[in-house]
Amino acid sequence: MTMPILQAVLALAQFVPAVSKLIGGSKIDAISKKIIDIAKAVTNAQNETDAVEKLKADKQLMTIFQKALIDSEREIELALIKDKENARTRDIAIINSGKRNKRADIMVIAAAVGLIVCLLCLIFYQNDLPGEAVGIISTIAGIFGSCLKDAYNFEFGSSRGSKEKDFTVASIINKNS
């Protein structure tokens, strides 16, 4: 019996917590399948459920799985960097052709408006809202704020730590090329 891909990856994350940081973005399906394929190869399992069970039962297999994931993490990180690079290249091409990226503009404006609306609701209705509603609205405001942060990271580059990681990955690629 097999389980859905995300459920299988989350089950595998119990053995290697770093798995959870790898799954995300537009390549989630490909990365999830890669993680599952690694688990199946290490355990010689026919499906995800068997792989998870074998990893639970055998600590040596779990260690081999962890090492295999660490080895493939570099490859996954490279794929994510290339994905972001392709999006930036597309954005530059759109701008150079004299057009505007309306989709990106709409996304940023919608996130900003959503954040402002949430904050205004919290300010103007703070006495009328029950605590649960304040919590939900605050969470939604945080999500909109995170969307804006991601947009700024995409537009202007990410944090210094991320740039150092990009530099390290680039130097590894150059050594292996």
Image (cartoon, helix red, strand yellow):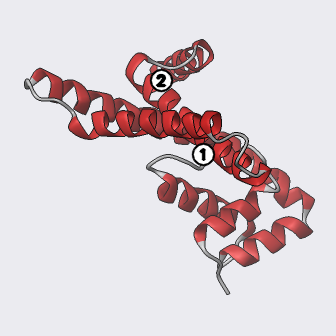
Which residue is disc 1 drawn over? 140
Q: Residue at x 11, y 29 (%)?
A: 99
Give residue 41's position: percent from left, percent from top: 65, 64
Q: Residue at x 61, y 36 (%)?
A: 124
| Label number found at residue 153 | 2
Q: Residue at x 43, y 29 (%)?
A: 151
Q: Is residue 21 above or below residue 52?
A: above
Q: Residues within 10 Å of mark 2 (few under 14, many from 20)?
A: few
Q: Is residue 177 visible?
A: no
86, 150: nearer the viewer = 150
Q: Is residue 105 above or below residue 139?
A: above
Q: Residue furthest left?
A: 98
Under mark 2, the amino acid is: Asn
Give residue 143's position: percent from left, percent from top: 58, 41
Q: Is residue 135 left or right of residue 106?
A: right
Q: Quadrant of the C terminus?
A: top left
Q: Residue furthest front?
A: 128
Q: Is residue 50 left or right of residue 102?
A: right
Secondary structure, mark 1, is helix
Q: Residue at x 23, y 33 (%)?
A: 90
Q: Is residue 35 left or right of residue 66?
A: left
